[in-house]
Amino acid sequence: MIFSYIVCLSGITNHWKKMRVSVLEIWAQLENVTNLKVTSQYEYHMKFKCNNCGTETENFMTFSDDNKVPLMGGKSFVNLIFKCKTCSRPSNVSVIEGSIRPYLAEDSLNFKPFVEFDCRGCDPLLFEPIDHFQCTNMDNTTEFNEVDLSELNWADYDERSNESVGIYDFKYRFTTVKKSTK
Ligand SMILES: [Zn+2]
């Protein structure tokens, strides 16, 4: 009797568990392009802060959605595991499935959520847009797959529509939201 009561209670709390999600929001000025996005192979370059002692990671950590690292025991997978250099606490980071959203022409000059991360034991601090992004021209007839925003600006020429295209003044920020998970 008591046993089943406990099982039932823990089932309820698990069901309503709130997960803290870190959101990478981006801002840019888009010229004649839309659908700015990353693929699952995108290599993120990010710095984190340890939630236990506040130490920041020295170097940029790199990881991608496609690269799955087994957590201890191997029952679940994350995209990045690292240990704090000061307090040795382990942290792990995962790109949340289905969270990658394209930044559209109408989003231009506004911060919009771009990708969400599940960060356990750490918070994201810095993001460097080193790996290439993708975007398309306005009527989706030209794809640009080598959009280099490492200098925060990118410009090209769309021969199909005979106009200049570009992305300017790239900015980002991290926010957090709470989401219910099962
Ligand atoms: Zn630490």
Image (tube, grey):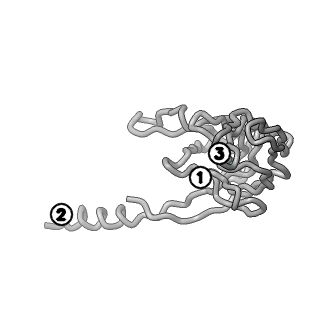
Q: Which residue is mark 2?
A: 4
Q: Identify residue type, mark 2.
A: Ser
Q: Is residue 11 above or below residue 155?
A: below
Q: Residue 180: x percent and y percent? A: 44, 64
Quadrant where the C terminus is found in the figure: bottom left
- Sooner in the amino-acid sequence: mark 3 or mark 2: 2
Q: Are marks 3 and 2 in contact (CB under 8 Å)?
A: no
Numbered badge on residue 101: 1
Identify residue for label 3. Answer: 37
> Toward which corner of the image does residue 58 lie, by quadrant?
top right
Amino acid under disc 3: Lys
Percent across and percent down for residue 28 are: 78, 54
The CA span between labels 3 and 2 is 48 Å
Label 2 and label 1: CA atoms lie apart by 42 Å
Q: Amino acid at mark 1?
A: Arg
- Name the residue at 76% across, 54% down: 172
Tell me the crowding category of disc 3: few under 14, some 14 to 19, or many 20 or more residues within 10 angstroms, Cα based: many
Tag 3 and tag 1, C-beta contact below 8 Å: yes
- Say if 153 sits above or below 9 in the image: above
